[in-house]
Image (tube, rainbow, N blue to C red):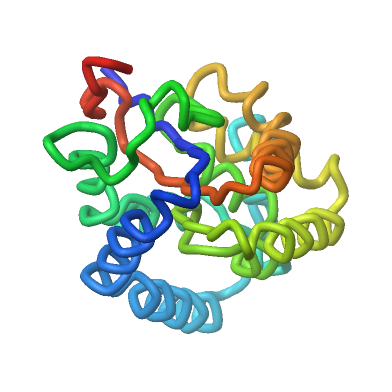
Amino acid sequence: MSADPVWCLFRIEPSDVLNVSQAFNQAVERSQIAFQLQDYLKIRTEILNQLPSQILDSSNIYFPDCLIERQQNSDVFDWEDLHQTYHLFFPKVFVEIFNNLFVGDTPIISQRMSQAQLELIITNRVCATEMLWGGLGWQCANKLPGYLGNMFVKPEDIANVLAIIEEVFTEISTDEFIQGAKSIGFRGNCNEDDAEALQSIILSCFHTVLQEGNGLLALSHPHIGIMPFPENY
């Protein structure tokens, strides 16, 4: 049985901003995610510079386009990155936030999960955030807020962050984005629709919280089947 990872996007009311901010910042500090990402990108660059040029057979239908002639576009987030970065997309301490997000005596978010939920994007084998990186490539994707899809944006910062995201999305054509996202989503089943809708979903969530005056929390969980759901969902 394969895992069904989920990317969760929640609205955060002003009254919950302090609790969410503390939990998120503690996870950033404990995981050392910024330094781990820097280390990976450094090692990745060194390996790419040392490898001889390898040209894959473009007639082989099992090779997505993003893997063809990889060294000619080192910015591509490909299957090798996918295998090497699981711990970066799903840091344990970020996943553990779910344990107290809506459950327990003092949940981090005071709203019911169904009220706070903007989107739960459930995919197969690969997460929506990994497809997002596949669509954008490393250079563009690293301009996004947060850490590989895990992010918290306060209400007062939503407008500026939305502008950044909109600008990032204009740096790559829609067709190119969908092609790259699908190349990663190809590792799972039935991910095509999610790959095509990713950009619109993200922008819609940010526009919603902007109009509401709320913040936004986005977290990835490795499997919807073991994600803790509150009884009063």
Seen in the picture, residue 143 relative to 58 is either above or below; the reply is below
The residue most toward the front is: 15
Seen in the picture, residue 31 relative to 97 is either above or below; the reply is below
Tell me: 64 left or right of 21.
right
Q: Nearer the viewer, residue 86 or 67?
A: 86
Q: Nearer the viewer, residue 102 or 110?
A: 110
Q: Nearer the viewer, residue 204 or 106?
A: 106
Tell me: 217 left or right of 159.
left
Query: Dividing the image into 4 quarters, which one contains the C terminus?
Result: top left
- Image point (31%, 37%), residue name: 222
The residue most toward the left is: 105
Seen in the picture, residue 32 relative to 73 is either above or below; the reply is below
- Image point (72%, 65%), residue name: 160
Quarter occupied by residue 223: top left
Query: Dividing the image into 4 quarters, which one contains the N terminus?
Result: top left
Quarter occupied by residue 31: bottom left
Residue 95 at x, y percent in the picture: 26, 46
Residue 59 at x, y percent in the picture: 73, 36
Q: Is residue 145 visible?
A: yes
- Image point (48%, 45%), residue name: 12
Seen in the picture, residue 34 relative to 178 is either above or below; the reply is below
Residue 136 at x, y percent in the picture: 69, 55
